[in-house]
Amino acid sequence: MDSAGHDLRARYAAYRWTPATSGASGAEVHRLTDTGGAGPDLYVKVAAATYGLSGEADRLAWLAGRGIPVPRIVERGTDGDVAWLVTEAVPGRPAAERLPEDRRPAVAEALADITAALHELPLADCPFDRSLAVTEARAVRNVHEGLVALDDLDEERAGWTGERLLEALHRTRPASEDLVVTHGDLTPENVLIDPETCRVTGVIDVVRLGRADRHADLAIALRELVSEDDPWFGPECAERFVERYLQRVAGKVTVDEDRLAFYRLLDEFF
């Protein structure tokens, strides 16, 4: 950490700082534990001012005002070069963690419920734009600036160049968008649940939240649920997720496989 980080350490000297094992790429993340045991645990994110922590804080505040469980902001700031965000830890465990087999359907349904809750927020009230007019342009910029992790593409695109990714993106771009309020990175790791009740306790890492096609969330959630790298979910959980989601938004939407494929491709650029 630079001087901003040292100032934070001074302000939170009563806490034990532990580097987080997961968190948003590009941000330094620490969990802070009150050594006196009186206060809640905190999380500190520190990143370059261009990373978007200010935008994440704005999104957290917006979601909190609409009843979505998110971390409470303790402090936010920037010195022009570095930005920081301090939040209270949300109770619960990531939905990605392995739970007993009989709880898998309930976890899939909980993920579907929070997805539907986000998608049912009033679109006109959302000030954050993640439509294709924004994200496609950013995808192009990320390729040109070497920001796409070409060594970490999905298996079916392994070995592709940035130019090939862009060609496929432009060629398969949907003609229209079914805009809703989306999380933007809706993996089970970013949804916290009570391990006993399997109810959602919080949503984290909301830096990509905004108005976008609902398939942007569905594509990522379903990719994770059927992933062979996380086999404790599997196809049955993916089917349960879709069934529950469609029940929640009954009569409003169908799940389009072509759009799912497009938004999984789009995610490669971020």
Image: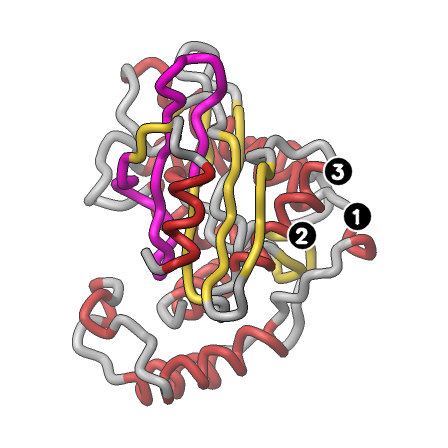
Q: CA distance from mark 3 to mark 2?
A: 14 Å
Measured from the top left, where is residue 135 in percent x and y?
Answer: 54, 73
Out of 256 and 25, give the one closest to the viewer: 25
Label 1 sits on residue: 122
Residue sitting at x 61%, y 38%: 246
Discs 3, 2 touching: Cβ within 8 Å? no
Whether residue 221 can be seen here: no
Residue sitting at x 53%, y 49%: 206
Out of 33 and 12, give the one closest to the viewer: 12
Circle 1: residue type: Pro
Measured from the top left, where is residue 95 in percent x and y?
Answer: 39, 30
Q: Is residue 37 above or below residue 9?
A: above
Q: CA distance from mark 1 to mark 2?
A: 8 Å
Image-based side of 179 in relation to 83, left or right:
right
Circle 3: residue type: Gly
Measured from the top left, where is residue 193 in percent x and y?
Answer: 46, 24
Label 3 sits on residue: 65
N-terminal of the two: label 3 or label 1? 3
